Image (spheres, grey):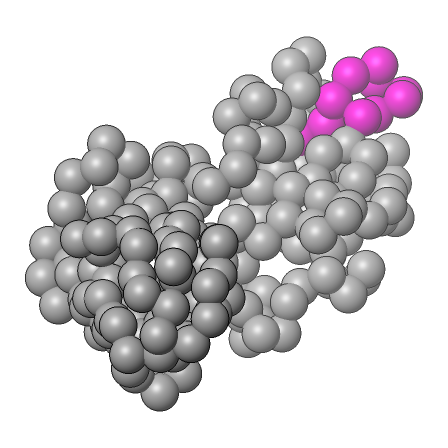
């Protein structure tokens, strides 16, 4: 019985006699998610010793366990009403990384991803050379999501980005930002893009300053 959230935490049990427990033969993982963004906040499962099987709990019981353990994140949600609970019978599906709860279907699905590309991957390490980095929102099959207008933060391990804080706005699912090199040779420069609300899988691109 645990709730997996950044390393996992052992949580207090719901009493065996609780009417909120429904025994089930199949393993059940309760996925807690942000209703606004669909981002997965944690996962909770419970094995009922008395019933000799896994237990499916109602939403309020799962939220109560997370609330009592202080695991409802203040930054992601403002109240319990902003957190949903999805019971998933397939533990492999429930524990997959880079998934979200699709608000359209109400089911777990691969998260859209941020693809990071540039027309070349080698820059002169002279502090003057630059390249335009393109960030695009893509579905699980790599298709452009041309209706997306999210704000995205771009970061780099070396060099200088043209926009303050690396913040850019998707328009038609695409955003661009210029990266300028530094006056030195750097074998590996990693440019990363992530959205501000956890809706997309993080994207990266490796470059080199010669």
Residue 61 seen in render: no
Q: x, y percentage for residue 10?
A: 86, 46
Please identify the dominant SS of the magenta region.
Answer: strand
Quarter assignment of residue 26: top right
Quarter assignment of residue 197: bottom left
Q: Give the range drawn in magenta.
A: 47-56
In the depicted view, which residue is nearer to us: 52 or 74? 74
Question: Looking at the image, how many numbered discs can be counted on the residues?
Answer: 0
Dividing the image into 4 quarters, which one contains the N terminus? top right
**Residue 111 falls left or right of residue 46:** left
In the depicted view, which residue is nearer to us: 27 or 175? 175
Q: Above or below — where is 2 with respect to 66?
A: above
Magenta stretch contains residue 89: no
Q: Above or below — where is 148 with respect to 58?
A: below
Q: x, y percentage for residue 108?
A: 42, 36
Quarter assignment of residue 29: top right
Residue under the point 61% across and 38% down: 30
Residue under the point 37% across and 43% down: 111
């Amino acid at each position: 019985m645990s709730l997996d959230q950044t390393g996992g935490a052992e949580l207090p049990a719901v009493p065996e006699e609780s009417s909120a427990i429904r025994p089930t033969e199949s393993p059940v993982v309760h996925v807690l998610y942000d209703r606004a963004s669909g981002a997965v906040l944690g996962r909770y499962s419970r094995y009922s010793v008395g019933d000799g099987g896994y237990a499916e709990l109602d939403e309020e019981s799962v939220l109560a366990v997370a609330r009592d353990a202080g695991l409802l994140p203040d930054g992601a949600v403002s109240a319990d009403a902003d957190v949903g609970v999805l019971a998933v019978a397939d533990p492999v599906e429930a524990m997959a990384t880079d998934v979200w709860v699709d608000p359209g279907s109400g089911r777990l699905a691969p998260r859209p991803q941020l693809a990071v590309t540039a027309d070349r991957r080698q820059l002169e390490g002279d502090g003057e050379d630059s390249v335009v980095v393109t960030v695009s929102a893509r579905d699980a099959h790599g298709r452009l999501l041309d209706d997306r207008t999210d704000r995205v933060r771009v970061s780099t391990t070396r060099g200088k980005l043209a926009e303050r804080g690396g913040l850019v706005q998707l328009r038609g699912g695409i955003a661009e930002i210029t990266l300028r090199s530094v006056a030195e040779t750097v074998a590996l420069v990693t440019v990363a893009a992530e959205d501000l609300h956890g809706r997309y899988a993080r994207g990266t691109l490796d470059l080199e300053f010669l």
